[in-house]
Amino acid sequence: MSRSICALMLSTSVCVPYAAAQTVEPFVLDPITVEGGDGSAVADDGGNAIDIDAGDLALQNPTDLQDLFIGEPTTIVGSSLPVSQKLYVNGVEETNLAVTIDGARQNNKIFHHNATTLIDPALLEAVSVDSGVAAADAGPGALAGSISYETIDVDSLLEEGDSFGGKFATEYQSNGDIFANALTLYGRTGNFEALGYLKYAEGDGREDGDDNTITGSGTNLLSGLVKLAYEADAGHRIEFSYESVGDDEERPFRANFDRTFLSVRDYDLQRQNIVLTYTDETPQGWWDPTISIAYSVTELLTPFDDSFSYGGTTDSINGKFQNEFALNLGTITAGIDFYSETANLEEFDLADSANDTEIGEEAWNIGAFSQARLDLTDAARVSFGARVDANELEGLDGTTYSNEGVSGNVSGEVDVTDAVTLSAGVSSVWGGVALAENYLLNTAWTYPDEIEPVTSQNIFVASEANFGRWNLNAKLFKTEIDDVRTESFSEGAGITNDMSSEGFEIGAGYAWNDGLVRIGYANIDTEVNGETADAFSGIYLTTPVGEIITLQVNHTFANRGITIGADAEIVLEETDVAEGSATLPAYEVFNSFITYTPPNDDSWVLRAEINNMFDETYASRATYGLEFPSLVPLNEPGQTIMLSASKTF
């Protein structure tokens, strides 16, 4: 352990720098936000939130979900291929969280070998995760929390007084000869504003630390974003957003693991998100509305063999109307939301299209919610809320299940002293009956008379302490989810399972005038039906986690426009595994970076990184198949040098 920490500190001092601007951006130390200038810190969201802002994104320069959540030991991502990466929060798979992009609900459970939410981090402005306990206005189905992705917009990019701007970014990764180029243009004239973003990345297969090519690891990604908005002088604002990402490349036959006797095949995964939103930017009194309607869709096309191929489409039409009421003590947000969703599977006969077939399920939900966020005193804050949902699922054969349920949550924090804050929260969530996965749909299913609606219970207790430049945090948490629908192609449509995740997190950070160092540790145990989980039993539920340590350090030489930094993930061996499973191996991976912004021209940012510095051969702890000798898990890339440059104009 001590050798790992020493290696991290050494790498920071000898590596080429990364980074930023002339002043230090805020850096998130979950659950405390640390400011680089004077070492001060403030509590954030009751000790239960992970908030990644524009400054963090500039510092991290993420290229996929693993990079996006680096440094968060309770938030892990499996697979080295973005097309099959899955995110786990407190050990719970993201399909059990309410996930939104620009406020639009995501319905992305399309194929269990694929990613759930494929996203390009380069177009993000902020990410917020409420783990376990989530507010009622986070949306339906927040069984184990919520994840909110917000994309870039004109306000965050355009300098005050300017009417037009843009940014060009180019990037090269040595491992796989990956080239990526992105162009962003944005402007405002009168009451109108517009933004456009386009990125294309391509590359060959990458190699792991043993110089073996990772099967199906080529890069062929295209992503884009368009935003148009009109804001009247009176503050009425209408915004249209269209975001798209596509990955079309040869992948392992099962995209989240390898088998030597199976070939590769093409996976064409496309996800789109369309949102129309109305807000009042100059609210008065109790009138502060948000109205949105959205359409999100994920499509996957892949051949099975030379005779036929499959195409899956999962979509969601969703919307909400809510109003935030301002009170002397805080706010109350109340409103209604809805979704109408489908999961369809098409089989294409490549010899005769007349034999093509299509099957699917449909679901809808309408909910009413209210959430209060109040400052009871200068030292005590509380948030509580509830929602009522009506849910209906229609199966392949027309079988219908209609259910109603109530969810509630309460959390609060109290400043015990000027330096110490204690917080806690609980929630009970009703989630209805979810759609089946597209690729498991089977016309031979006989639906049971009843499928139990899924429910969950969450609890956390946390503490935060700020002693000058030192910041300390700790959290205990537990999530239990009952009757999760886990349909099986061969065993039927009505199968349900229970899962639980419990653990704790501790962290410490020290900030100085131009930098900081941070360490985090998490220990998480997960179960399915009362037994230790493995990756197979945990599909769409959980994955074995164990003990994870994260380390981060950075320093800015403000007068020179240089920032250097490094990070590490240290995962300990896990012997508490499911019966018949192999021990999960330990690994240590270190990364470092340097950025340079010319002091006389801050429109340029030049960056160099060395990822997996010591060429470790490993697969991420959340990667599928680590426990099963018959499978070959997808290793992470070996040592990779990444060079990038961006020019803002």
Image (cartoon, grey):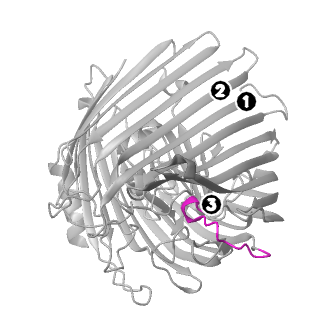
Q: Secondary structure at mark 3?
A: strand
Q: CA distance from mark 1 to mark 2?
A: 9 Å
Q: Could you tell me the amino acid type at mark 2?
A: Glu
Crowd around label 1: few <14 · some 14–19 · many ≥20 (10 Å): some
Q: Is residue 607 something one can see in this rendering? A: no
Give yes or no for residue 558 being in the magenta stretch.
no
For the C terminus, the quadrant is top left
Q: Could you tell me the amino acid type at mark 3?
A: Gly
Which of marks 1 and 3 precedes in the sequence? 3
Give yes or no for residue 437 being in the magenta stretch.
yes
Crowd around label 3: few <14 · some 14–19 · many ≥20 (10 Å): many
Q: Does 228 sit left or right of 336 as displayed?
A: left
Q: Is residue 138 above or below residue 574?
A: above
Q: Which image quadrant is residue 25 in?
A: top left
Q: Residue at point 17% right, 60% down?
A: 615
Residue holding disc 3: 145
Q: CA distance from mark 3 to mark 1?
A: 25 Å
Query: Are the two marked residues, 1 and 2, in contact with CB atoms closer than 8 angstroms?
Result: yes
Residue placed most toward the observer, 630 or 346: 346
Residue holding disc 2: 239
Residue holding disc 1: 279
Q: Residue 192: image x %, image y %?
A: 62, 15
Give the total of numbered labels.
3
Crowd around label 2: few <14 · some 14–19 · many ≥20 (10 Å): some
Q: Residue 38: image x %, image y %?
A: 42, 43
Q: Does 209 sit left or right of 630 as displayed?
A: left
Q: Residue 510: image x %, image y %?
A: 38, 56
Q: Is residue 533 above or below residue 287?
A: below
Report the magenta residues as a range.
436-450
